Amino acid sequence: MELRHLSGFVAVAEELHFGRAANRLHVSQPAVSRLVRTLEKELGVALLDRSTHHVELTPAGLAFLTEVRAVLDQVEVAGRAARQAAAAVPIPLRIGFTECTEELLPRALRIFRRQLPKVSLDLRQIDRDAQVQSLVEGELDVVMRRIPIEHTTLKTELVMKEPMVVALPARHPLAERPRLSFAALAGARFVLLPRAVYPKAFDRLRILCEHAGFVPEVAEEASSLTSVTVLVAAGVGVAIVPASISARFNLDDIVYRPLENPTPTLPVMVCWRRSDGSPALHRFLDAVRTLRPASVGEEHLSEVAVPAPAVMVGG
């Protein structure tokens, strides 16, 4: 079994057409057919159902495709490592993050750079939906985000659960209190992220308010946490935001107060390709894990159940 057999099979499995697979590989269609037949003969199973009009994967072919992709990904990683060593030029670690995690990333990077000071960093603030495709296609090595990724080739790990706080205009009557409950927010007007973009954040905030005996009145919707804090500072309303936001937006016109009964939390996730064995990536993951409080433990996403009071915000 050779890599060309595996690459030929993946091309046919993804295109479901021998002609298109041949064009993609820049070989003849009979050559692609021979590659797949040789592979099936060696494995002793049919990987494809062929007819005059269409090509489909068999159950064996579907299972084989998942593993072959992982093998080819690892071959690419190995080749990249070899090229890096040959050129003696460090390949940058490409890190994606969202607005909601940019306060936590510098702490991890300080630890990482102490261990690998010569590895260059390529930091990209990227939309949460684009993160998945960028990881799968190898354009990013790792991302920090708030919402888990469900994909067979990716792994997601919980780093921490960050508490949420109330952001209030400095002259708001509730700003004089040191702590606030959700019940105290009854009658306040809220600045929210739009439900169409952040349905979980919107719905869970509404549930928390309803448990406290009121329905939140929406003063304004904002497209980002930056916009949320600007509107709060302008006196438009109050907002529920991650505690780390207070360090970035420490303005005279806005105050932050802890929430209690209950205190909602916001997960911080780190995601990467399962097949990626890059030493730099795994050093970065180790650095991120040092941020994890002891109370979180070594939980993997599949074992983490985010409680109902948790509020998902952003990516």
Image (cartoon, rainbow, N blue to C red):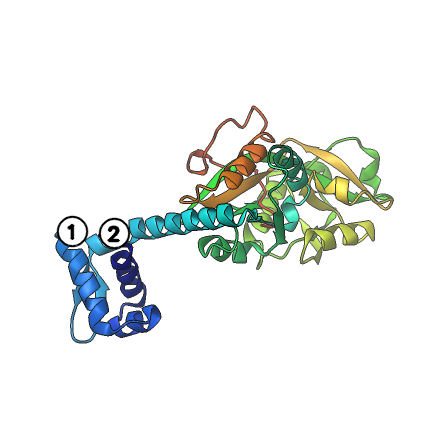
Q: Which mark is residue 248?
A: none
* Residue at numbered disc 2: 64
Direction from residue 279 to residue 75 in the image, left or right:
left
- Asked which secondary structure carries label 2, the reply is helix
* Residue at numbered disc 1: 43
Choose top left, top right, bottom left or bottom right for residue 261.
top right
Choose top left, top right, bottom left or bottom right for residue 227.
bottom right
Residue at position x 45%, y 34% from top?
Answer: 300
- Residue 294, horizontal then vertical, whole percent: 56, 24
Kind of residue indicated by mark 1: Leu
Say which label, 2 or 1, has the lower sequence index: 1
Q: How many marks?
A: 2
Residue 152 showing in the rendered view = no
Report the front residue among 315 and 254: 315
Residue at position x 60%, y 36% from top?
Answer: 116
Report the front residue among 275 and 215: 275
- When the figure is inspected, residue 200 is found, relative to residue 180, above or below; the finding is below
Direction from residue 22 to residue 108 in the image, left or right:
right
- Asked which secondary structure carries label 1, the reply is helix
Callout 2 touching callout 1 (CB < 8 Å)? yes
Specify few, some or many for label 1: CA neighbours under 10 Å numbering under 14, 14-19, or 20 or more: few
Kind of residue indicated by mark 2: Phe
